[in-house]
Image: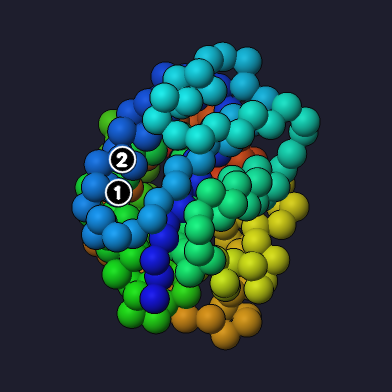
Amino acid sequence: MIAAVGVVVPARDEAASVSQCLHAVRRSLLRLPVSVERAVVVVADRCVDDTADRASTLADVMVANAPRTIGEVRDLGCQTALSRLSTREALLLNTDADTEVDQHWAARHLARARRGWHATTGPAHLVGAVPGGPNAAARYREIVDTTENVYGANLAVRADAYTAVGGFGRAATGEDHSLWRRLREAGYRIGVEPGAVVHTSARLTGRAPDGLSSLLRRLASGG
């Protein structure tokens, strides 16, 4: 039985959005049974703004000053979250600092985990106008509706499965897809939970070279 939840939020210079992100996480965690232990960890990765200070009132903050890949940043957050929990019967929830999770986000992922799923992902709805206009927005919806999309901004994985496949690893980009692929190859039960929704920025610049921002740039340019 999954008895604990750890939420991991990597952040680099996200002072403008990290508080909203963490308030949304808190609202979502309030929907969990009171018996479920919880920890929220923000990894402030080489920030030059006051991201860490703003996050510190709402979460544990790990300040990472040495260069790390996004995979290593997420792993640091996951290991820190597990160290804060008293049990390894835990679910690790990942999101991003420019993202706001739905109020039912944590509960929907937890319900899947308690039904025997080792990892789940869910939809990432874009906030605001999609760069490139209606055509780009339509293409984004088509991609989301017709493929199994995995987002680091909306990813849950049981701690035992996460550990068994080596976590996110040293991936500089696509760390979410790498973990998902290794879970699948190892025979773990993985799938999409449509009710676990997040709302994320439609910005064209992001830290991951081949992440959501890269996809939106391609769509905006007609690619």
Quick check: 205 above or below 159? Answer: above
Q: Position of residue 181 (x, y in %)?
A: 60, 71
Question: Could you say where residue 64 lies in the image, as x and y percent from the top left?
Answer: 69, 31
The furthest residue to the right:
66
The answer to whether residue 96 is visible is yes
Question: Which quadrant of the rendered structure holds the N terminus?
Answer: bottom left
Q: Secondary structure at mark 1?
A: helix
Q: Which residue is mark 1?
A: 29
Give whichever of 210, 81 is nearer the camera. Answer: 81
Residue 181 in view: no
Q: Disc 2 on helix, strand or loop?
A: helix
Where residue 23 sits in the image (x, y, percent)? 31, 33
Q: Verify CB contact (< 8 Å) between mark 1 and mark 2.
A: yes
- From the image, tell me which residue sits under label 2: 26
In the image, 120 versus 110, the foreground residue is: 110
Q: CA distance from mark 1 to mark 2?
A: 5 Å
